[in-house]
Amino acid sequence: MKMFTADQIRAWDAYTIAHEPIASIDLMERAALACSNWILQHLFSKKKLHIFCGKGNNGGDGLAIARLLLQEGVSVVTYIYETGTKGTDDFQHNLERLHKLTKEIHFIQSAEFFPALTADDVAIDALLGTGLNKPIDGLMLQLVEHISNSPAAVISIDIPTGMFADKSCKEYTCTRADHTLNFLVYKLCFMMQENADWFGEVHLLDIGLHPTYYYETIAFHQLIDQEIISSIYRKRKPFSHKGVFGHALIMAGSYGKNGAAVLSAKAALRIGAGLLTVHTPKCGYTVLQSTVPEAMLETDVEEQHLSTLPTDMSRYTAIGIGPGIGLHEQTAELLMNLLHTAHQPVVLDADALNLLSIKKDLTKHLHEECILTPHPKEFERLFGKTNNDFERKELALQKAEELNCVIVLKGHHTFIASPNGDAWFNNTGNAGMATAGSGDILTGILTGLLAQGYNAEEAAILGVYIHGAAGDLAAQQLSQEAMMAGDINQYIGSVFLQL
Ligand SMILES: NC(=O)C1=CN([C@@H]2O[C@H](COP(=O)(O)OP(=O)(O)OC[C@H]3O[C@@H](n4cnc5c(N)ncnc54)[C@H](OP(=O)(O)O)[C@@H]3O)[C@@H](O)[C@H]2O)[C@@H](O)CC1
Ligand SMILES: Nc1ncnc2c1ncn2[C@@H]1O[C@H](COP(=O)(O)OP(=O)(O)O)[C@@H](O)[C@H]1O
Ligand SMILES: [K+]
């Protein structure tokens, strides 16, 4: 699904008005209807609704929502943030219509006009939407804080007031919503960890804008969805043999961390690699042979850490390195040898990334079939600090282009930066995956997909999606608390059955 900027959404609005054609006020009515239906369906109608409106079109939505809910018999009081200036045309029009229906319209000119809000109330935040052009301050800030700090349930229309759709508002305050009713397509701001405390649960509402604009407009970011996955995923042909699905090599484990190798190895097999060899230190031998009998094993000459590449590297179609390998000097040499010689696709994770951040000049050996999978801390070690999540995303794109490799920046909405500038956010996965070993499984998944011939960008998109979707199924069955990383592997098969 394409993700548009606030400017693009505004242009889509204008395109729909011109080409459907439809009057702007009728478009606002559609948006308001979608919101009021959502509110009615989610039982908030049982409580008293306080609708706070600005004088832009976000406020216009609020006024129309007030009218639609009043017509359904809901108890509604409307408040208008008074600026002393006239509202937009659609705002004024909706104000006239609301005046005909109710006397419960109050104007807020100072903090004395703020209503008391109780736990039985619902506050609807229609103060400011995508027209925000500076951080909120003064009375607007006080009102937003009043709403956010109240015990009422808070629903923001389109976007919490004070949040910028396309840039950071980390230093500022926004409405703290329980739910945000976001129109049409996800905005960038909802992908960012730093905003998570503000927007609550985001619900996507279709307000029926013209499809042609959607199809013809280039988006800078995409949210990975079923359609994208179906276009990448290749079904197996009936006559295929195991040679077709590649030979994956996983280099993982060290003394006390051979479990990481087990998790990665199982994931590489579950995702469908034809053959798998695991390269571990000698101490991993019994662990691997007894837990992953499907895998072949090439033990290192060293007992406790990796030091030397396996003998015939040309056998492998894809390589994954990093889970549990530690930071031994000899392991760093192995990584250096690998990057100097490997022509195959390579996934670098965990300690391979930490070694890379110690020996940064090795990054010049990365190539377009390499995938780096840092979590935010590893990303920072590799590429330095950024001021906020938006800057970090930009840095990931810049580094992907500079190093000519795919960067998978892991998080709740994992971000995939491609060397060609493509930018993808993932929408599967849950907090149950914030548990030791989840990342090791992703390494195995990505290596297994590369071995099967998916290119690095395809493998990253498909792999991150399947990893999260398997995590979601595991959480449904076992709870987020009780699930363990190994459980993610158990549900990879169920995800394939749904593709
Ligand atoms: N597809 C669509 O697009 C559809 C969009 N729709 C709705 O329209 C909304 C966008 O409406 P919008 O453009 O009128 O902007 P909105 O946010 O209501 O207010 C702008 C006003 O706020 C002011 N202002 C700005 N920053 C401020 C600040 N910090 N503190 C105080 N004031 C500030 C600014 O004043 P100025 O600085 O220009 O004087 C300006 O007057 C969108 O979110 C959605 O809800 C639907 O109705 C239909 C389909
Ligand atoms: N709250 C969350 N929501 C979605 N996915 C998550 C969440 N927490 C962790 N994950 C996923 O789990 C994996 C954790 O990887 P990583 O941090 O390397 O963990 P580990 O070092 O334990 O293997 C990543 O793929 C990440 O996207
Ligand atoms: K709002």
Image: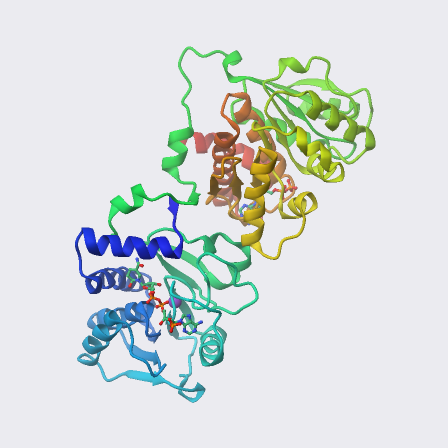
**In the image as oriented, which residue stretches furthest toward the front?**
402
Residue drawn at (44%, 75%), measured in percent from left and top?
Answer: 147
Tell whether 61 sits left or right of 348: left
Tell whether 72 sits left or right of 498: left
| Color style of the picture | rainbow
Residue 423 vertical position relative to residue 259 in the rendered view, above or below: below
Tell whether 249 sits left or right of 40: right
Residue 494 vertical position relative to residue 236 in the rendered view, above or below: below
Q: Position of residue 279 (x, y in %)?
A: 71, 22
Q: Is residue 409 visible?
A: no
In this rendered view, identify the residue nearer to me: 448 or 420.
420
**In the image as oriented, which residue stretches furthest toward the bottom?**
112
Q: Position of residue 375 (x, y in %)?
A: 62, 44
In this rendered view, identify the residue nearer to me: 408 or 421.
421
Residue drawn at (32%, 65%), measured in percent from left and top?
Answer: 43
- Ligand 1 is found in which quarter of the picture? bottom left
Q: Position of residue 492 (x, y in %)?
A: 50, 32
| Quarter of the image where one finds residue 123 | bottom left
In this rendered view, identify the residue nearer to me: 59 or 321.
59
Residue drawn at (72%, 37%), measured in percent from left and top?
Answer: 360
Q: Is residue 25 visible?
A: yes
In this rendered view, identify the residue nearer to me: 166 or 328.
166
Quadrant holding the C terminus: top left
Q: Position of residue 52 (x, y in %)?
A: 36, 75
**Number of callouts in the render?**
0
| Quarter of the image where one finds residue 239 | top left
Quadrant holding the N terminus: top left
